[in-house]
Image (cartoon, rainbow, N blue to C red):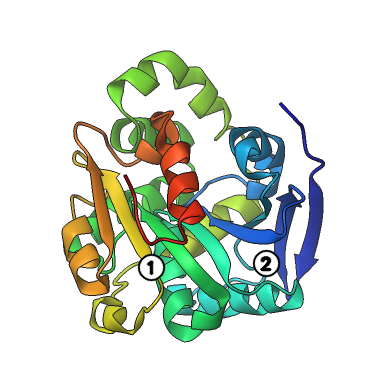
Amino acid sequence: MKEYEITYGSSSGVRFFRFGNGSKKMVILPGLSLKDLMSAGPAVAAAYNMFGEEYTVYLFERPDDMKEGDTVRDIAFKTADAMDSEGIREAYVFSASTGGMIAQCLAVIRPDLVKCMILASTTSRMTAENDAGIGKWVSAASEGRLDELGEMFLENVYSEQTVRLYRMIILDGMKDPSEDEIRRFTVLAHAIEGFDISGELSEIKCPVLVTGGSCDKVLGNPFSLTAESTGALLRIYEGYGHAVYDEIPEFKDMIKEFFYNDGRSLS
């Protein structure tokens, strides 16, 4: 399989990496991460290698100047600025978890940037229960209880089978965060508290696929509401949890099919 060179850059205060040489633009907006996402470049390029011929694939980090009080919508505006700087229009957007919240805002405030999008394991409205769960992660991170935070991620994000097979790899990926990484993690976690774009979903006009696992311990199962409000296709994977997008091998085949059809259909 062809390997693609990874290029790193920064636009409008938002760092990114890209790979592939296709004429179409694919944008990945990932979820909440304790570690800087730029270090994941080789792993992401390997995992999404199948898109490199048809697309130039971008993964955008959170803005470097994030501060307490910033909202998901603020992050979306800054991501839009970065996409403008890179000349990206009508992107095929794959988003997961917190990235899905950013993607929904992006599709509302800048519909010209999004041709079609996939919302994986995300929600259009955080509940008090959702906020409380994320609040526990924030407390553990800000108080330096990083081993406890790692166990929370294992328990809530991944399936038992994944934890059994990859426990140490997952924990190693969260190991020894810098003070700045912890600060950014807590700021982003606070940004999603009370997130609610449910009243604006009818403004999203691009084709949408809403997907997730039926056993999501982070968000519950809010997917039907988001799908209904956007007129989206809906695909739920029974027995899977929050990280279903990383755990099912054929998930990326589904992404490719949806994008290939410009979001019009899915087998």
Quarter holding the N terminus is top right
In the rendered view, would you say 128 is above or below 249? below
Q: Residue 71: in sight, yes or no?
A: no
> Which residue in the structure is indicated by mark 2?
64
Disc ID at residue 230: none
Camera-side residue of 132 and 209: 209
User: Which residue shows up at 51% across the image and 48% down it?
Assistant: 33
Camera-side residue of 193 and 228: 228
Percent of width and height locating residue 67: 56, 73
Percent of width and height locating residue 208: 36, 64
Give the SS element for disc 2: loop
User: Which residue shows up at 30% across the image and 50% down it?
Assistant: 211
Amino acid at dot 2:
Asp
Mark 2: few, some, or many residues within 10 Å (few <14, many ≥20)? few
Amino acid at dot 1:
Pro
Mark 1: few, some, or many residues within 10 Å (few <14, many ≥20)? many
Left or right of 257 in this view: 160: left
Disc ID at residue 207: 1
Percent of width and height locating residue 187: 50, 64
Percent of width and height locating residue 66: 59, 71
In the rendered view, would you say 258 is above or below 13? above
Classify residue 183 by image quadrant.
bottom right
Give the SS element for disc 1: loop
In the rendered view, would you say 150 is above or below 108? above
Dots 2, 1 in contact, CB < 8 A: no
Q: Mark 2 or 1, which is nearer the eye?
A: 1
